Image (spheres, rainbow, N blue to C red):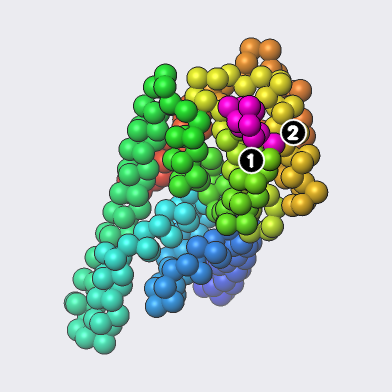
Amino acid sequence: MKPVIQTHLKNAVEKVFKREVTLQRARIQQQIDRRLAEIPEYRRQFAQKALDKVMKRFFGEQDEKVEIIVSVVLDAFEKDDYWQVLKQIEQSRDSDIESFVSALADFGLLDMALMANQAQSRLKLLDSLEDLIRKPNTLEMAIHKVIESNLWILGYEYSLIASNKTLARTIEEYTNNKFGGQRAKKRPDLFLAQNLRGNHLLVEFKEPSKPITRDDQNQAAKYRDDLEPKFGEIEILLLGKCRSSTNLSQNDPPRMKVFGYEHLISSARTQLDWLLKELGG
């Protein structure tokens, strides 16, 4: 009876495990569908298999941590080195066992190496961004350019948001109309993006030397009031040096988050350090 019971228990545990992995995958599936769609079709099935492997290995971790891994895996699949090893595996599948095993081993080593290299590269970018925000003459436009090209810095919940020509043109027209002529110097640096669910995010960049005041928050809320009739509900990220000493978080307007640049960098670095630790474990 024991072997029978053990078999039933094993099957039951495997069934529960598979269901839990599927549920966790579903929670972040929308966030990765667009990235998968951008990967060439001949690589996509391998990316899918790699993601399945990641979900199983990191089962039980918080969704945020799994999203870190997923993002880095998808980044790696955009590299030619990855594809070369995958082709080697396919070519050796019908040849001798030793060649096939060697190809699979190469894949595993490259799998880990590319993820680690990607994390290391992002850490170097964070170091450079930190240097940039500490320069006294750095303007908000410079920070805007860096973060717009590296949205993972805002947190992995924002790494798959995207702007498009329509959103960019809307912001350009809005700021030109509101801040023309003598008011041009007061023109805000705004970025409008959309996530996979169709919700919008408005990011306002302040100079790295400027603390964020209650007046700044009220003004950002006004920008949102002007834009929401066209786009619907909009979340705001207000970025600057830090909060002013009198600007308490419990008084924040709804759907608005305030972050200092150094806090963003620190949070992103912590996530990458965790990833590198896991890959080295």
The residue indicated by pointer 2 is 221
Amino acid type, label 2: Ala
Of all residues, the one furthest to the front in this rendering is 181
Report the residue at 33% width, 38% height from top.
124
160 in relation to 33, above or below: above
Picture coordinates of residue 245, whole percent (x, y): 64, 12
Residue 186 x, y percent position in the rendering: 62, 27
Q: Which residue is mark 1?
A: 176
Relative image position of residue 97 (x, y in whole percent)? 22, 80
* Quadrant of the rendering where the N terminus is positioned: bottom right
**CB under 8 Å between discs 2 and 1:** no
Give coordinates of residue 87: x percent, y percent. Answer: 28, 76
Q: Which residues are magenta?
A: 178-187
Q: Mark 2 vs mark 1: which is more N-terminal?
A: 1
Which quadrant holds residue 8?
bottom right
Residue 50 visible somewhere in the drawing: yes
Q: Is label 2 in a helix, a strand or a loop?
A: helix
Residue lying at 78% horizontally and 39% vertically, measured from the top left:
225
The answer to which quarter of the image holds residue 28 is bottom right
Query: Which one is in front, 278 or 207?
Result: 207
Q: Quadrant of residue 224?
A: top right
In this view, 118 is above or below 95? above
Above or below, 261 relative to 213: below
| Mark 2 closeness class: few <14, some 14–19, many ≥20 residues within 10 Å | some
